[in-house]
Structures are given as C-alpha cells and as structure tokens.
Image (cartoon, rainbow, N blue to C red):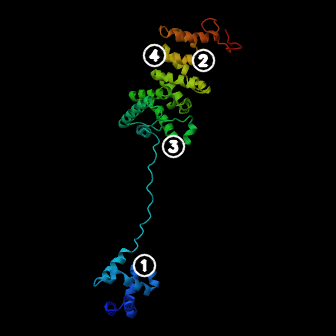
C-alpha cells in the first residue's frame, strides 16, 4: 500500500516506489511477475517485479491482482495431448467386382463339402453376374499363368480358389447350378476377351481335364468337349496325352453311338476327334475311331466325319473289318499314303 501511495504522490515515480517498497511487497509482486512472464522470471525476481509494475493489467485501481492472474492463466502453456497413431488407409480391393470376392467365400473347399439352399442361391446369382461382366469387360481380371504364381500374390491365390470351387460345382447335384458352372468354365476358357481368359495350363493344373471327361460321359454336355478342344489347341504338347489318358476318345465315340445325343453335341464330339487326329492320330486310330465314325448319317456332320476318315485312312491297313494299325504314319514327305 505504501508503494502504491508513493507512486501516486506528486513528483514521485514508480521506480522510486519500487525501491522503497518492503521486501514482502517485492516478493508478492515478484510472484505475480513470474506468473505473467514465465519460468525465466523466477531467476530474476526484482526485474520481474518491475516488469509486472509496468504492466497495465497491474496498474489500475482495484482488481489489478485479478487481472494479473487472468493474464497468467492466458499465457500458461497448454498440456500436450497424448500421441495417437495415424488413421490407416483402407485396404486395397483385390478385384473390382465384389461379387467375385463373395463367390470365392461361398465356393466349396473340397469335393465332399455339401452346400445348403441359401448358399447355392447366392452362388448362382454371383456366377450369373460374373458371367455378364466377363462378356462385356475386357480387363476385369488377370489370371495367373501357372499354379506356382498363386504363391506370389493374394490376387492369384484367390483366382486359384475360385477355379478350384468352380471345378467342384461342375459335378454338383443341382442341375441349374451345374449347368451354370459349366457355362462359366466354357466362357472363361473360350469366350470373352482373350486377355481375361483362363490359361489352359491353369485349367489342367486345377484338375479340369478329368472333371470335364467325367461330366461329358454323364451329361453329354457340348461345353465339356469344346473346353477340351481349347486345352489341346492352346495348351502344351503334354496336355494331349493327359486328355487321351483321361478317356476323352472313348467318351466322344460313345456320344456318337448314343440315340439321345443332339446334333450339336455330336458336332462337339467330332470336333474333339478332329483335334486329336491332328495331334495324336495313332492313338485315335488304335481306339477304333475310323470305323466308329461311319455311323454318322447327319448331312451337317458328314464333312467332319469325312475329315476324320481321311486323316486316319493312311494308318489303317484294309485287311477285313479288323485291320491292324500301322506302327507309324511318319514319312519323309509327311503322312504315308
């Protein structure tokens, strides 16, 4: 109080009042100055007190201490919030079609797995949508060339899981789902844009050859023979042996001899025999194909029948009905005449 009165006296100064102030007053003012100016003022209390006296917030009449406390609270350092991990980016989608990922989850994992009605219905709708996209979109998927590539990418591994489940669906008891699965297999291997087709090596390594031969023997589905033709034509040379050992020749000949087979089914079987005659004529001749195709009487199928007979005639020695097959048909100029 004495310091404030001295500063208010005429001819007096605040510096003189500060010099004449008691030590207790200096201590209180120094504390207020430290609160206003920060931690550095605690080391210099007299300078802090003088600075506090010069502040207008402490020079007014009444309420100066309140205004000084308010200034101290305003200049106080805010607490640092705790560290938070940055928000991660959403995971990239493997495929553009959510229906394809849903179909992978719904696909059966083994031949013994049974599907309920709801799961079959969801698979049916997903396969229908995927089939429409495959026939219209050129770059909707990239299939792996071999099964070994499935270990390098999660996308290729998902493709392998889809093909594995599709092969199992081709032998499903439900006729509608089985026919749709076979149509999807045909379109993925022969239809659509060539960049989005399944490579023949991937079909063979997933076990489609034995499944297609078995399905062709049971249902005479023309798609089975057309997919086999695609595998033989576009695949490696050893795939021909695999198709023959699976019994494709016998299945095609039994279809030609069947009275229930449709002309389109017989045409698909003849196309398979023509393709095998071009790749392995001796094996086809040993199976008795030359005499078996003679039963074809449909005028639309006679050109295919004549093609097979012309290719096998040099291999068959005409000694009765059961003539032996030549050891080889290779000569310097091509097929032996």
Q: Earlier in the sequence, mark 4 or mark 2?
A: 4
- Say few, some or many: other residues with alpha carbon within 10 Å of mark 2 (under 14 / 14 to 19 / 20 or more): some
- The residue where tag 2 is placed is 278
Q: Residue at x 53, y 27 (%)?
A: 209
Q: Nearer the viewer, mark 1 or mark 3?
A: 1
The correct choice, above or below, for 324 with respect to 80 in the image is above
Q: Earlier in the sequence, mark 1 or mark 3?
A: 1
**Alpha carbon separation for disc pair 4 and 2:** 21 Å
- The residue where tag 3 is placed is 154
- Say few, some or many: other residues with alpha carbon within 10 Å of mark 1 (under 14 / 14 to 19 / 20 or more): some
Q: Residue at x 32, y 92 (%)?
A: 10
- Say few, some or many: other residues with alpha carbon within 10 Å of mark 3 (under 14 / 14 to 19 / 20 or more): few
- The residue where tag 4 is placed is 264
The correct choice, above or below, for 256 with respect to 202 in the image is above
Point out which mark residue 239 bears: none
> Which secondary structure, mark 4?
helix
Contact between labelled residues 2 and 4, with CB atoms less than 8 Å apart: no
**Alpha carbon separation for disc pair 1 and 4:** 95 Å
**Alpha carbon separation for disc pair 1 and 3:** 59 Å
Q: Earlier in the sequence, mark 2 or mark 3?
A: 3
Near-viewer residue (228 or 249): 228
**Alpha carbon separation for disc pair 2 and 3:** 39 Å
- The residue where tag 1 is placed is 38
């Amino acid at each position: 109080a004495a310091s404030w009165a001295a500063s208010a006296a005429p001819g007096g100064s605040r510096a003189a009042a500060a010099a004449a102030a008691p030590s207790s007053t200096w201590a209180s003012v120094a504390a207020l100055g430290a609160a206003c100016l920060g931690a550095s003022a605690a080391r210099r209390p007299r300078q802090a007190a003088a600075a506090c006296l010069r502040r207008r917030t402490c020079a007014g009449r009444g309420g100066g201490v309140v205004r000084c406390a308010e200034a101290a609270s305003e200049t106080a350092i805010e607490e640092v919030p705790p560290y938070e991990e940055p928000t991660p980016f959403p995971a990239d989608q493997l495929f553009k079609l959510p229906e394809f990922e849903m179909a992978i989850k719904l696909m059966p994992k083994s031949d013994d797995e049974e599907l309920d009605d709801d799961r079959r219905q969801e698979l049916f709708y997903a396969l229908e949508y995927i089939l429409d996209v495959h026939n219209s979109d050129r770059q909707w998927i990239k299939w792996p060339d071999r099964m070994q590539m499935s270990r390098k990418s999660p996308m290729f591994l998902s493709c392998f899981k889809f093909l594995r489940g599709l092969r199992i669906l081709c032998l499903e008891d439900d006729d509608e789902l089985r026919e749709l699965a076979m149509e999807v297999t045909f379109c993925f291997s022969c239809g659509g844009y060539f960049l989005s087709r399944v490579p023949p090596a991937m079909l063979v390594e997933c076990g489609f050859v034995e499944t297609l031969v078995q399905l062709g023997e049971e249902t005479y589905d023309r798609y089975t023979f057309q997919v086999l033709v695609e595998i033989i034509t576009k695949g490696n040379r050893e795939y021909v042996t695999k198709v023959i050992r699976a019994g494709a020749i016998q299945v095609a000949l039994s279809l030609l001899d069947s009275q229930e087979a449709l002309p389109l089914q017989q045409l698909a079987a003849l196309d398979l025999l023509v393709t095998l005659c071009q790749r392995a004529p001796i094996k086809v001749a040993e199976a008795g194909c030359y005499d078996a195709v003679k039963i074809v009487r449909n005028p639309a199928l006679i050109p295919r029948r004549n093609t097979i007979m012309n290719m096998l005639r040099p291999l068959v020695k005409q000694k009765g009905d059961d003539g032996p097959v030549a050891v080889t048909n290779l000569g310097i100029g091509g097929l032996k005449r």
